Image (cartoon, coloured by chain):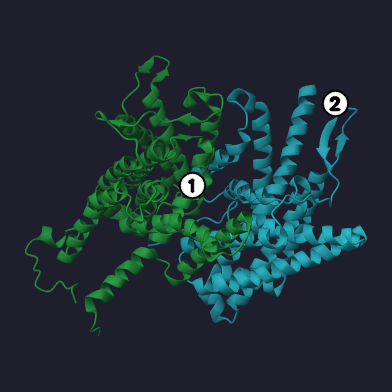
Amino acid sequence: MILFGQILEVLIGGLLSGVLYSLVALGFVLIFKASGVFNFAQGAMVLLAGLALVRPLDYLVAQGVPFWVAVVLGLVFAAAVMTVTAWLIERFVLGPLVNQDGLILFMSTIGVTFILEGAAQMIFGADAYPLRLFPTDAWFLFEDQFPGGVLVNKLDVWGGMIAGVLVAGLAVFFQRTKTGRALRAVADDHSAAQSVGIPISWIWFIVWLVAGLVALVAATVWGTKLGVQFSITFLALKALPVLIIGGFTSVPGAIVGGLIIGAGEKLAEVYLGPYMGGGIEYWFGFVLALLVLMVRPQGLFGERIIERI
Amino acid sequence: MLYREAGQFKTSYAADMAVFPIRQDRIAFWILLAVVFVGIPLLAHFHIWPFGSDYLLRAILIPFLILSLAAVGLNILTGYCGQLSLGSGAFMAIGAYCAYKFGTGVDILWLSIPPLPVLPSILLGGLMAALVGVLFGVPSLRIKGLYLAVATLAAQFFFDWVFARVKWFTNYTPSGSVNAPQLEFFGLFVNTPIERYLLCLIFVVVFAAIAKNLVRGNLGRQWMAIRDMDIAAELIGIRPLYAKLMAFAISSFMVGVAGALWAFVYLGSWEPLAFNIDRSFQILFMVIIGGLGSILGSFLGAAFILVLPILLDQVPHALGIPISVETVSLLVFIVTGALICYLLIVEPHGFARLWSTAKEKLRLWPYPY
């Protein structure tokens, strides 16, 4: 019974932290779906959004502004920063690169990563800044069933709820609104979309804006968990196996992939790790993704790749 | 006016297919070889400007040569065969650590190999990298593009962990950092920066020649067919299994040798951090900025990516602008990123394409039509 409780605890912790990976992976999926660009800069955007939130917030609180007012102002400011960033990226990097090969676009987003990382830290400071938006203490569940109960982080639960709301919101946006339909049209075929009068540059701006806002949401949760600091950009790498398992083009896939990776990673670390010297969390997700790819090359929910000559 | 091929008639197929079909190119190439093999060592030996101290040799030319070799290796895989790889850092690490193990003696189970001389251990290190490369190349038969890139990232993270955690590879040193053995080749000791430079140069020239001739031949054409359209290549009778895995093997071999050189010749003593994901990205940048599918491009890209941050570091210093070291490093980030974006917009095919455009222009100069 103790063992079962322990497994349950690890499983729940893993699933919830997997949802947090999904938050980052969502940003990737949005941009890939709508423009075919594999946006390596998503991690840097999380860093930028986090810094643009936490610095004004700290400043306002130090000025004596009530905390919740400061939070709202900080969020508005960060959203404005992400809007400007989206516009700049579309205008100066992706706009001139229309019709280039996917690899070139991918490389250009790595260039954007460097610029964002450098600029964000230069403007807002390069230290680690703690962010306290969500409670970080823990709940103990099922205390009567298992001795000691099952420990669940409140922050992770918040993250899960936010991810759920975000996915629902994005699904409505993609399926029900005019802009969302235009986005899907652009994703299907650039030139056909253009020929029926959809302005591509505007659509791409919207996509990057939405990805920037998703990065802001991810930054609130991850910033609370780790503090806003440079290492947050590595989240982008942690989110890659999530993408692979879920498929690059599927929003629900990003969530399911996150759950699988999160749970798999934690279970492997706790039950396999001790036999292998520990720290296997570091690569387990990637090897899991590799195995999934061997069976289903397009990921679990990705669109089937059909090739013609 | 000097760069004309008028009067140079090719009378055989071999002459037509030569690496340098134009005589001026051949002469320029031999002059270049003379400069790098004789000129630079002489200048460095007599401390003539710009080789006043060995900084240029030690901190720029040696890493440039080694990373060019790695870039040539990756270019075979990514540029010629079209398989995107983000795991070059891992293959460099395998080359380095396996060369180290062979150099200090291997002892597993019933297998016991005495310490080998440096040259065989470096080559065996490359061979081990090639084996692992083939293993991680197997998924490429099913997946491609960005999915494959992420699959190669699995190699990167896995081997980062292996070399940090499996103490056997580091001979159980408590700090996890290891020292390269004394560099001795056929009784000659390689110690001074000039000797180290020449050693790297020999490796690079030999491997670049091999690479250049491979990509011109049967195998290279198979790779390019696979890159351009794999299904069509399969239909005309190219075996993807053989071609792709050969690309992985040869590419990983070169990258592994580069890793062994990086560890033995440039670093001297190193820890797993020397071959992390940043190294993989650095080499990929070199290949793409230099030009996919070009051996020359690998060298140009390596020069650009390696020298740019060093130059940018010096600029505020030289202009006498007082800014902190931290700000400079962030500025280097921004400028590097901006330059990469700018180059991709101006010339997505890299320096190699710029070079060939310049050569075309030169042939018509000064009377272009």
Chain identifier for the green-coloured part of the image: B
* In this view, A263 is above or below A254: above
Indicate whether B121 appears above or below B138: above
The reply, left or right, for residue B77 in relation to residue B20 is right
Residue at the spot x=50%, y=54% of the render?
B146
Q: In which chain is the residue bearing label 2?
A: A
Q: Which is nearer the eye, A218 or B277?
A: B277
Helix, strand or loop at mark 2: loop
Identify residue for label 2: A146
| Direction top: furthest residue | B110
Taking the image as shown, residue A282 lies to the left or right of residue B172, namely right
**In front here: A306 or B98?**
B98
Q: Horizontal and vertical percent for residue A275?
A: 61, 23
Q: Which residue is painted at 83% across and 50% down in the image? A: A132
Point 63% across, 76% down: residue = A202
Q: Chain of mark 1?
A: B
Q: Is residue A251 left or right of residue B288?
A: right
Structural distance between the alpha carbons of marks 2 and 1: 48 Å
At which x and y percent is residue B53? 39, 49
Camera-near label (2 vs 1) is 1
Residue type (three-letter) at the residue carrying disc 1: Arg
Asked whether B227 or A1 is in front, the reply is B227
- For label 1, the SS is helix
Q: Position of residue B74 (x, y in %)?
A: 39, 49
Q: Colour of chain A?
A: cyan
Image quarter where the N terminus of chain B lies is: bottom left
Q: From where the camera sits, is residue B149 visible? A: yes
Amino acid type, residue under disc 2 in the picture: Phe
Q: Name the residue tied to disc 1.
A: B279
The residue under the point 69% across, 38% down is A263
